[in-house]
């Protein structure tokens, strides 16, 4: 992104507000999907599996894995922004906070409501924090870094997601219908929210 394009994103305070609101919502979306116990995104299956096997909370593993993924940026020559660092630190904090505050739902209908709300909130959050233009998340940066090495975005994303899902499942993370719902819905929902979360004017 060129410097000339930055003013169209809005003032810095507005962009920071969008960034941190997006990260808070992203953590909330993760928490709702996990609390549904119907299966989360591939990365969250991985984080759950680590929590089951090695202890610590899911949110702590989101932070640790995010930081480790950023180390892979070094050979890929990716440059983090304030949004990247904030993503690593805050998404896990918000996910743990929401999981602590929200009681685990019992009835299946409530669990489905949590799952669907979590997927929608995650998509809206993605539109907010990406629209702020302050740096990609660590996992997104890994994808674009692999793309620079010659892999297509589709292959890079699929390779990353399938690897995270497989390892997470082997470690005991919850894979279920929610994982399928996330995989099918997150792309179209993100595409829907992206232009609507873009600053006007």
Image (cartoon, rainbow, N blue to C red):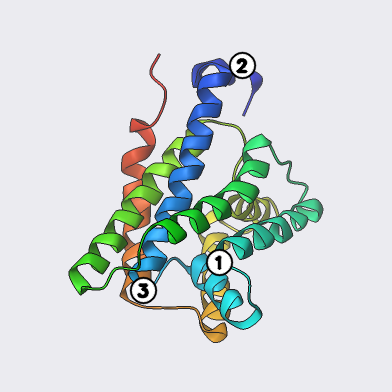
**How far apart, in angstroms, are the residues tagged by discs 1 and 3?**
14 Å
* Mark drawn on residue 99: none
- Furthest residue in direction right, as rendered: 75
Q: Which residue is mark 2?
A: 4
> Which residue is label 1 attached to?
58
Residue 154: x and y in percent read 50, 59
The answer to whether marks 3 and 2 mark residues whose Cβ atoms lie closer than 8 Å is: no
Q: Nearer the viewer, residue 40 or 154?
A: 40
Residue 150 appears in view: no
In front here: 171 or 28? 28
Determine the CA span between mark 3 and mark 2.
45 Å
From the image, tell me which residue sits under label 3.
Answer: 37
Q: Residues within 10 Å of mark 1 (few under 14, many from 20)?
A: many
Q: Do the residues under discs 2 and 1 have CB atoms within 8 angstroms? A: no
When asked about the image quadrant of residue 194, the answer is top left
Where disc 3 sits, the SS reads loop
- Circle nearer the N terminus (3, 2): 2
For mark 2, give the secondary structure.
helix
Q: Residues within 10 Å of mark 2 (few under 14, many from 20)?
A: few
The mark lying in front, picked from 2 and 1, is 1
**Sequence-wise first label, 1 or 3:** 3
Q: Which residue corresponds to the image point at 68% horizontal and 43% vertical from the top-left?
A: 85
* Residue 31 placement (x, y as % from top left): 43, 59
**Front: mark 3 or 2:** 3
């Amino acid at each position: 992104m060129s410097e000339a394009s930055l003013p169209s994103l809005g003032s810095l305070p507005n962009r920071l507000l969008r960034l941190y609101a997006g990260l808070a919502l992203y953590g909330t979306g993760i928490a709702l999907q996990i609390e549904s116990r119907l299966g989360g995104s591939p990365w969250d299956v991985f984080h759950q599996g680590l929590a089951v096997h090695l202890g610590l909370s899911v949110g702590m593993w989101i932070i640790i894995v995010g930081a480790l993924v950023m180390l892979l940026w070094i050979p890929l020559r990716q440059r983090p922004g304030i949004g990247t660092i904030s993503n690593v630190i805050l998404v896990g904090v918000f996910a743990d906070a929401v999981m602590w505050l929200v009681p685990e739902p019992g009835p299946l209908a409530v669990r489905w409501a949590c799952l669907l709300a979590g997927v929608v909130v995650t998509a809206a959050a993605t539109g907010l924090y990406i629209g702020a233009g302050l740096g990609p998340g660590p996992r997104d940066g890994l994808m674009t870094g692999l793309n620079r090495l010659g892999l297509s975005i589709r292959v890079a994303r699929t390779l990353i997601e399938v690897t995270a899902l497989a390892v997470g499942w082997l470690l005991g993370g919850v894979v279920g219908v929610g994982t399928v719902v996330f995989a099918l819905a997150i792309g179209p929902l993100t595409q829907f929210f992206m232009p609507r979360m873009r600053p006007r004017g």
